[in-house]
Image (tube, rainbow, N blue to C red):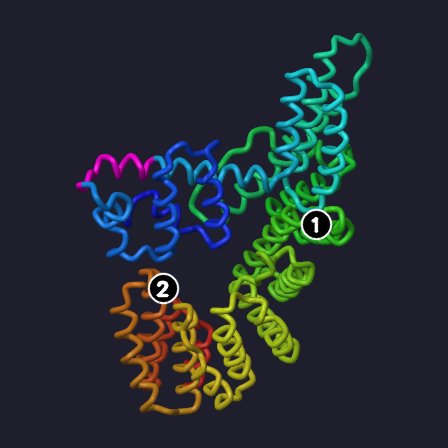
Amino acid sequence: MKNSKLIALLSTFDAEDWRWFIKFIKSPYFNAREELIPFADYLRKISPDFVEKAITKERVFQKLYPKKKYDEKLLGHLMNYMLKLAERFLAQRKIEEKEPIYNIRLLEVLVDRQLSKHYRHYEQKSKKLIEEWKSVSKDVFLYDYQLAEVGNNHFMSQNLRQYDANLQVATDCLDEFYFLNKIKNSCEMLSRMALFDTSYTSAYIDEVIDHASNGTYKNPLIKVYAQTYQAIKSGENIAFETLRKSLHEYRDQIPAPEKESIYSFAINICGDKMVRKIDAMFYAEQCLELYLEGIEEEFMLDRGRLSPWHFKNVVKLAMNLKRYDFTEQFIQENYSKLEPEFQEDALHFNLADLYYRRENYQEAQQHLLQVQYSDIFYGLGARAMLLKIYYETQEDEALVSLLASFSIYLRRNKKISAVFRETYLNFTSLLTQINKATKDKIPIIVEKINNTTRLINRSWLLLICEEFK
């Protein structure tokens, strides 16, 4: 039962989900099987871990039917009913979260029942609500279209022979919805083709971009997405700068979810330029600005929390730009925005990295000793940094010992992906070779460093090889 679809779904429930699900399941409108109520209560008590001993089919059946003989078929039916209820509950909550959808569905019912007075009341309410949602939702074009479409159906149901604007509004909103999503999907296609060995086609996208760029639409979102597409496709600095200018000009008119999407595309453009060393410093500065704007305006936060990856990327960018004082200030002011379980490791690991860059190796080591390895990547990064410190400070015994133990750890830890294992093992292997090398062996090692595809700290390895000259 532990590996069932039911338990996999219920494992995602938090305390709030359970509270409302129990109320949902107690409603006879949704649930006509009373035995599902104690079933849900029991599952709630043993969630979210669902320990194997507590979740065996025999154990669960005994809890539900203490006087009955175990019946696998009956339990299977109950599990299936419970799964369907849980799925319906989640769908219902999603609908209720998006109030415009609920209102539009209600308007459809009022049209069907020819309740014009009720319809007019909820139509005005829905228009006001959609206007409020325009700052937070990426679906407003769809809501506008659906509302206008319902309005057109209401007009037709009255058999009036006069002009009605709803048909024109519905057509315009449908165009805007199509153009926006067509361009967004095409941007994503270009981004994925740059990352993966794959190919996509987007029919008529050039015509769509031309049409979207000519100023037809009052809402700037379509224009900005068209500029995003052009910046990704062309790779030209001027196209990127045009996009950045528009992001500043229209920053207050773009809904937060859309802003996050556009900024992510812009950050990917910067990342690609930096990897290919094309105006790397310019794009590093631009990338840092994009991250900082997203964090300051909070559209890059998830329910008020900062992603560890965004945090780490800002720190790396700032340090690569040698803005060390700013980096320390950013770390101290923003590490508390991470999820609590990541905060201490993020604080100490990134301060260690900062002090390492400043060649304050003793202070760097003090912070590394406080890293608890809450995340496997902090563990890998901390060990790699310690190796660099031991080499820089000529602590040969500590270096050799850590090289051996780290290599064993990489080979034995099954949680490390094959790619990361190879990347870090290549680093430990090459550093071992450098540490043992004589001057005449260095050219061979340099060639290996340059030809090794998966490798961290490549530039540092090349730098310490230079010291042999």
Residue 422 image position (x, y, % from top left): 32, 65
Does residue 3 belong to the magenta stretch? Answer: no
Q: Amino acid at mark 2?
A: Phe
Label 1 environment density (alpha carbons within 10 Å; few <14, some 14–19, many ≥20): many
Q: Eyeballing the image, is 189 above or below 266?
A: above
Q: Amino acid at mark 1?
A: Leu
Say left or right for 243 vs 399. Answer: right
Farthest residue toward the left? Answer: 69
Residue 307 image position (x, y, % from top left): 54, 62
Q: Eyeballing the image, is 424 above or below 43?
A: below
In the foreground, 280 or 218:
218
Cα separation, mark 1 vs mark 2, equals 35 Å
Q: Quadrant of residue 76?
A: top left
In the foreground, 74 or 306:
74
In the foreground, 328 or 422:
328
Say left or right for 441 vs 291. Answer: left
Residue at left offset 58%, top offset 57%: 303
Check residue 318 in the rendering and tell me which mark sits there, or answer none: none
The magenta stretch is 69-80
Q: Eyeballing the image, is 352 above or below 235?
A: below
Residue at left offset 46%, top offset 50%: 18
Q: Which residue is mark 2?
A: 420
Quadrant of the image containing the C terminus: bottom left
Say left or right for 277 vs 179. Answer: left
Check residue 243 in the rendering and tell me which mark sits there, or answer none: 1
Residue 134 image position (x, y, % from top left): 71, 42
Q: Main secondary structure of the magenta part?
A: helix
- Element type where label 1 sits in the image: helix
Residue at left offset 74%, top offset 15%: 155
In the foreground, 135 or 316:
135
Farthest residue toward the right? Answer: 162
Residue 265 image position (x, y, % from top left): 59, 50
